[in-house]
Amino acid sequence: MTFSVGAFIVTISNDIQSFATAWPKLRELEKAENARSYAFQCRDHLEIWLETIGAERHTRPLFVSVSDDAGRPVMMIPLGIEKHNGVRFLGFLDGGVVDYNAPVLFGSAAGLAQADAVALWSSILRLAPAHDVVVLQKVPQYVGDIPNPFYKLAAEPWPASGYFLTLDPGHDNRALQRSTYAADNRRQRKRLSEIGELRFGIARNEREIADVFDTFVRQKSRRYAETGAHNGLDVPAKRAYYSALAQRLSNGNGVQLSYLSVDHQIVATHWGLVAGRRFYYLMPAYEAGIWRKFSPGRLLMEELVAWSYDNGIEAFDLGIGDEEYKLKWRAQAIALSGGLIPITIVGRTYCAVVQARGALKRRLPPGVIRVIKSLQTKTHKS
């Protein structure tokens, strides 16, 4: 479907291959000088997402291309419609594995007026397949150096921020020096080196990737159990998503599965993304038992920051969450927004229920909320 909105041409398709020549891949992002995108919205990432998580969630994809009247691309928007408990939701392709939801923006988007963004979005929603609620979550203020038009369309501040370290590749390691962990990390490295050879590695071949991935899943699952958090790796589609990305996109820009070992025993692992000049620190894990006291996960992160310096990375993205360690690294915050937009009577009812639950939660004492979360976790596991 193609239609005009003022001076813009909009095309909607359920097949991302309709835009294959213009939609950048993870490995192409650094060379695509005119395109700005987070890793999560790159084409090869989305294709694997649809094969795994999207298939399990029965997501109906909705890919949108916006160009100007001269035919220059302005933005690409990866959306989907899902139905849960009788309510149809339209939003970015996420499923709980995406840190930032945004369109792919091109240079011409820098001059996009907010009134034009509102008109485009209204037309897209009007012509999209039927849905009850628009869900906008974790929407960053910028995509690269261009303001994200969806940031103001999502009217509420998101309850947590994203964080990143600005690096100066090939020049110095000021981010490492700034970390308040630096002195303790040196001490821990010395202690581990007295036990055996300390080695940082990146899984390269199929066998190594499989072995490191199995260790990563075991370490991460144990940590989920310790904290009482929901183990997403227990969900077959999510495990398939992480595994497929690692197996298919680990060479060059794309996915990086790394580890820290002592005399060939892997004591820490990390699953992350690399796109353009941005590294995404997403899924760290580490060994428990006697290794815990050596802070192996923190040492692996330090190795990854150093690797990023050596490989021309300009931003080391720490993802969403206000954890204390990010402040100790003196990371910069990424402003995020979100919001629910009801479209139908069903949608308005759903949004009213969500608002009522939110108001109740704000009135409950923190201790009661912790008990409720604990019971929900136990129910989910059973």
Image: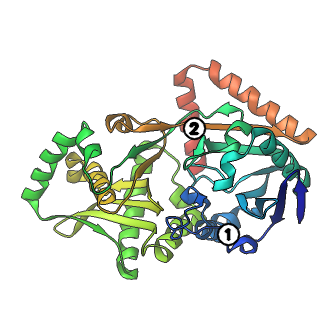
Q: Residue at x 22, y 67 (%)?
A: 265
User: In the rendered image, which quarter is residue 11 located in?
Assistant: bottom right
Write down the residue under mark 1. 22
Residue drawn where x is 20% and y is 42% of the image: 182
Per the image, the residue denoted by label 2 is: 375
Query: Looking at the image, which residue is at 81% across and 31% down?
Result: 352
Q: Is residue 265 above or below residue 378?
A: below
- For residue 106, say whether it is visible: no
Relative to 276, is 355 on the left or the right?
right
Asked which secondary structure carries label 1, the reply is: loop
Q: Can residue 112 be seen in this snapshot?
A: yes
View extreme (left): residue: 194
Circle 2 SS class: helix
**Amino acid type at mark 1:** Ala
Q: Nearer the viewer, residue 371 or 340?
A: 340
Give the Cα separation between the discs numbered 2 and 1.
47 Å
- Residue 10 position, x and y percent, is 83, 59
Image disc number at residue 315: none
Q: Between residues 84 and 177, which one lies in front from this camera angle?
A: 177
* Callout 2 amino acid: Leu
